[in-house]
Amino acid sequence: MTTPVRLKVAYKTPESLLGELTKSVGRGGVRIETKKSVPVGTKFIFELRSPGVRDPVEVSGTVLSVTETAPGSFVLHIKYEPPRVRLGLDAVIRRIFETSQFDKNRKAPRIPLHVRATENNPDAPTYRLRDISAGGVGIDVEADTLPRHIRVGTAFQIQMKLTTGMLTVPGQVVWAVSSRQSDTMPPRVGVAFAGLPPAVAEMLNDLLTLKALPTPPWIARVSFGS
């Protein structure tokens, strides 16, 4: 059996590590530029590290395809698998929860979770879940302006199929940025959850700790308004 290729990747914060991890797993993998080609099927183990966390998050990957972009330059398309060993992952999540205690602006720690979301409206833009907590969710809007039916006070609901079942969480828009501020700052809204039934709160907590993950492909369904 061929020994997997082991790569170490360093992140500046636990939040950036977890954000990149959920983004990569959610879209099915990563692209790596390299000067050396490898056979399709080559196994990788990525050691993801961040300050303040002793144990790395280990993620397995398999090369699905190799593209030569120029003489001596290649792009590897690698399928990511969710971490099977939780030691490092639990340490990262615990570190995020610990540091959030010093953030007086937030009632609950927010976990970076990059998930594409759609609305049952042919004219609606695509949405991106940015982060989520027991108390709410942050959502980016892939458009230059916020849709007219979304404003502060608008009712909200999100549905996401997890490995443990269908998660349905109601909420309300509590703040909104109505127009694009820059290429990296699109219109966005903040949604607050409240009064969740115990079963829903428990399923949401499993998502926050990544004990339950969205089923591939990572797509949520959102609705704004009654």
Image (cartoon, grey):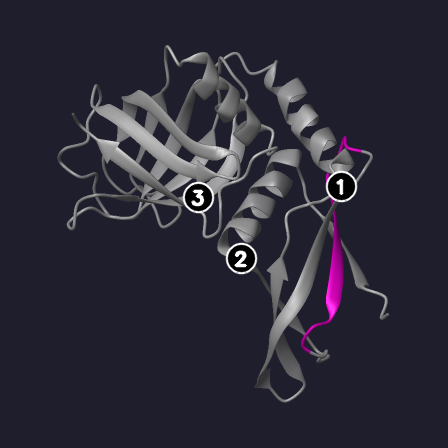
- The residue positioned 71% from the left and 79% from the top of the image is 39
205 vs 217, left or right, is: right
Q: Residues within 10 Å of mark 2 (few under 14, many from 20)?
A: some
Instruction: Give the residue at mark 3.
Output: 115
Instruction: Give the residue at mark 1.
Output: 85
Q: Position of residue 68 (x, y in %)?
A: 59, 84
Secondary structure category for the residue under label 3:
strand
For the N terminus, the quadrant is bottom right
Residue type beneath disc 1: Val
Q: Position of residue 44 (x, y in %)?
A: 74, 62
Does 41 appear in magenta? yes
- The residue positioned 35% from the left and 40% from the top of the image is 140
Q: CA distance from mark 3 to mark 1?
A: 23 Å
For the C terminus, the quadrant is top left
Mark 2 and mark 3 lie on one chain; the one further toward the N terminus is: 2
- The residue positioned 46% from the left and 18% from the top of the image is 199
- Tell me if residue 159 comes above or below residue 169 in the rendering: below
Secondary structure category for the residue under label 1:
loop
The answer to whether the residue labelled 2 contacts the one labelled 1, judged by CB atoms less than 8 Å apart, is no
Residue type beneath disc 2: Gly
The answer to whether the residue labelled 2 contacts the one labelled 3, judged by CB atoms less than 8 Å apart, is no
Secondary structure category for the residue under label 2:
loop
Q: Position of residue 15 (x, y in %)?
A: 60, 35
Q: CA distance from mark 2 to mark 1?
A: 19 Å
Does 173 appear in magenta? no
- The residue positioned 58% from the left and 47% from the top of the image is 20
Range shown magenta: 40-53
Residue 33: image quadrant is: bottom right
Q: Which mark is residue 28?
A: 2
Residue 149: image quadrant is: top left
